[in-house]
Amino acid sequence: MTLTLALFLLAQDCASRGSIDTAVERIEKTAGDAPSQRFFRSPGNQWTNARNRESLATATISRLSSGETRVEFSSTSESGDWVEYAYYFYDRRGRLLRLDRTYNTTFTNSSRIERSYYNCTGRLLHKDQQLVSLDTKQPLPDNTPDEVQPNPVYLTTRQLPFPRSAR
């Protein structure tokens, strides 16, 4: 088997949305029992494990015994008009499998829900996106602009913005 063919087969193996969803379900089931670390973003945009009254963003890293990792970010505006949740799911090699984001805003009384799938080389495979009413949860026409810049996409756990000891 040639190296090119072997790499192609490997990429195909880690490119299935179904297998990614199965891995994420396993991570979700066990993440609550896994050791975790909590971080707070300071006004200077630095992440620290010291709670700060002025912090409008938090992150929780859960490391599973299998080596997989879940990272949950949440951030809000000072006024509470919007909140964003982002869940990053990493395989045991620290590569991003899936990113789930939810952005709720009272400006448009809506919730933007996104789910992005990545292959083992970090390439975006597929992205689902939906805009729903906060009140009824019914789909809305997606003609509203994003009011906030979403969290960056951290393709590996090494890219996470925390102190090196936490990655």
Image (cartoon, helix red, strand yellow):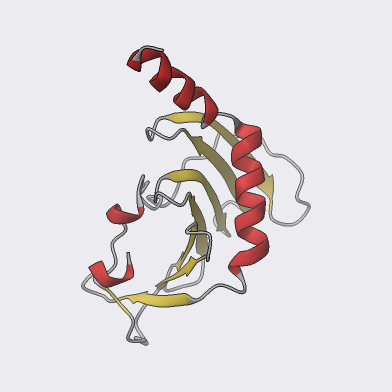
Q: Position of residue 150 (x, y in %)?
A: 41, 50
Q: Is 162 rendered above or below residue 148? A: below
The quadrant the C terminus occupies is bottom left
Q: Position of residue 8 (x, y in %)?
A: 43, 18
* Quarter of the rendering containing residue 155: top left
Q: Position of residue 96 (x, y in %)?
A: 44, 45
Can residue 139 be seen in this snapshot?
yes
Q: Is 163 rendered above or below residue 21? A: below
User: Which residue corresponds to the image point at 74% horizontal and 57% vertical from the top-left?
Assistant: 135
User: Which residue corresponds to the image point at 46% horizontal and 73% vertical from the top-left?
Assistant: 79
Q: Position of residue 97 (x, y in %)?
A: 49, 43
Q: Is 156 rendered above or below residue 164? A: above
Q: Nearer the viewer, residue 60 or 2?
A: 2
User: Which residue corresponds to the image point at 44% horizontal and 50% vertical from the top-left?
Assistant: 147
Q: Nearer the viewer, residue 149 or 135?
A: 149
The quadrant the N terminus occupies is top left
Q: Residue furthest toward the left?
A: 44
